Amino acid sequence: MTTKIKICGLTTSDTLDVALQSGADFVGAVVFPKSPRHLAPETAASLFERARGRAKIVAVTVDPDDAMLQQIARTLRPDFIQLHGSETAQRAEQVRARTGAGVIKALPIRQADDFAAADAWDDQADHLMFDAKPPEGSALPGGVGHSFDWTLLSGRAFRRPWFLAGGLNPDNVAEALKMTGAPMVDVSSGVESAPGVKDAGRIATFIQNARRS
């Protein structure tokens, strides 16, 4: 089975084009003002229209209110809304109804017990994302370059397709896939030269290395 790849936090046409040309399956626009990768919905819509039909467009949000969801749905028209905050499964149902988009739910992982949260999302998430739990006091729920212990995934099976995220980069993605058998991977800071600044070469190499594994 071919690994699906998501490049998240794209902010420029050049790096988005590299992701698309290299074969990314999902491309993510972060709509969260505290993130160095934040794009206003209108800006994201203008940039990501070139991706429509070539890759799945994902709007990455953190506890979005109804007004923000409506703005994202009207302008960006994403294929998926990624929920990266403390949203409940009930809220995900509302998100789907208000936007018409699929739902990706990110779950923070530090220890084995954290995977228990996945059960609540069987009926409400199209995909799950297992991301490293951020450090205490972090203003960002993801995209900080930290990974969790991948051996925690050994022997686990999930009813929904899932992404491995957190601390991935061109140098370790092949090892991560070998260890976890992840059907999908997500990367953001691991293909940057500075926070929020994507590196075209790292994007291309990440996708190439993930495909080879």
Image: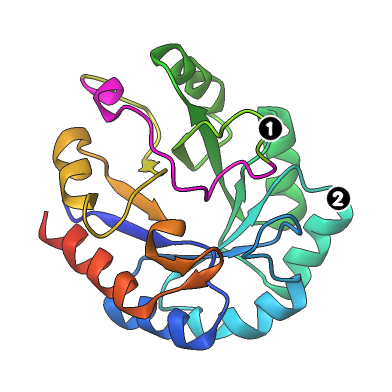
Please tell me whether residue 149 belongs to the stretch shown in magenta: yes
Per the image, the residue denoted by label 1 is 137
The kind of residue on which mark 2 rests is Asp
Instruction: Examine the residues drawn in magenta and state their main secondary structure.
Output: loop
The kind of residue on which mark 1 rests is Gly
Q: Is residue 69 visible?
A: yes
Pinpoint residue 60: horizontal percent, then vertical percent.
62, 55
Query: Callout 2 environment at 10 Å: few (<14), some (14 to 19), or many (20+)?
Result: few
> What label sits on residue 110 in the rendered view?
none
Q: Given the current orientation, which residue lies at the most extreme left position?
A: 212
Depth check: give the residue in front, 173 or 21. 173
Please tell me whether residue 166 belongs to the stretch shown in magenta: no
Image-based side of 46 in relation to 48, left or right: right
Depth check: give the residue in front, 25 or 85. 85
Image-based side of 8 in relation to 155, left or right: right
Image-based side of 118 in relation to 212, left or right: right
**Disc 2 and disc 1: Cα gap in Å?**
26 Å
Which SS class for mark 1?
loop
Q: Residue at position x 55%, y 39% from top?
A: 105
Per the image, the residue denoted by label 2 is 66
Query: Callout 1 environment at 10 Å: few (<14), some (14 to 19), or many (20+)?
Result: few
Q: Are marks 2 and 1 in contact (CB under 8 Å)?
A: no
Q: Residue at position x 56%, y 67% from top?
A: 196
Image position of 208 with respect to 88: above or below: below
Pinpoint residue 187: horizontal percent, then vertical percent.
40, 56
Pinpoint residue 175: horizontal percent, then vertical percent.
16, 44
Image position of 58 with respect to 141: above or below: below
Q: Report the span colored magenta.
A: 139-154
Q: Residue at position x 32%, y 49% from top?
A: 184
Pinpoint residue 80: horizontal percent, then vertical percent.
57, 56
Depth check: give the residue in front, 180 or 36. 36
